[in-house]
Amino acid sequence: MLIQVMLTRILVDGGILTALVGAGLVGILYFKPRIALSDYPADVRAAVPPRTRTELRLGLLLSVPLMIVFVAWPLYSVWLVKQESGGLLTYGMAFATLFGEYLLVSLFDLLVLDLWMFYTWTPKFLVLPGTEGMAGYKDYRPHLKAQLTKGTLLLAIFSALLALVPVYFY
């Protein structure tokens, strides 16, 4: 019963979180791709000027609501797990729910945004002026490696720390 409750929350709430964060990221990339300049391939970053102060401020301004959603929605989901499991919530349940939801977002980022949209499709709005045809747009290996190693480790650490909140405050 507990596993079913957790899996439902991970899939439903993780799907909603993925849709919200994914829409936010695609929106940012569509309207102001230079905000994500640090995520572009090294050869592309080297060929364009660094982000301006305005771009840095706008990036911060746009990332704050995404970060609030990225933290608040999974915490709400863990609260739902507690409600649906009769008031029972262990650290392991909180961690598994959080990590599961963040893993869904991470997989969407890797498979849909990075491998499909950026490296396979490469729509014109993603290509920065003056960088058309650069090899980095088709080299997925550095991002794949980073996402599957450091990225997953950071998700686990973040989930482990964030799982303390519902355990001690719900």
Image (cartoon, grey):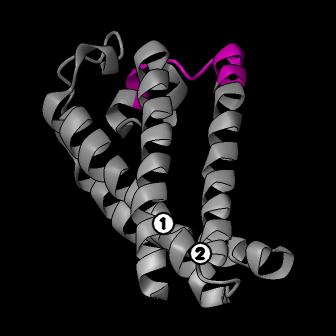
Residue 8 x/y as whole percent: 42, 68
Q: Which mark is residue 84?
A: 2
- Which is more foreground, mark 2 or mark 1? 2
Out of 142 and 83, give the one closest to the viewer.
83
Asked whether the residues under the numbered discs 2 and 1 touch, taking CB atoms below 8 Å apart as contact, a structural biologist would say yes
70 on left or right of 120? right
Q: Residues within 10 Å of mark 2 (few under 14, many from 20)?
A: some
**Dominant secondary structure, magenta:** helix
Residue 46 x/y as whole percent: 42, 29
Q: Residues within 10 Å of mark 1 (few under 14, many from 20)?
A: many
Residue 60 x/y as whole percent: 70, 31
Q: Marks 2 and 1, Cα distance to the nearest angstrom?
A: 10 Å
Q: Which residues are magenta?
A: 45-58
Per the image, label 1 sits on a secondary structure element best described as helix
Task: Locate the N terminus by quadrant.
Answer: bottom left
Disc 1 marks which amino acid? Answer: Arg
Can you identify the residue that label 1 sits on? 9
Per the image, label 2 sits on a secondary structure element best described as helix
The residue located at (23%, 55%) in the rendering is 141
- Residue 95 visible to an observer of this rendering: yes
- Report which quarter residue 52 is drawn in: top right
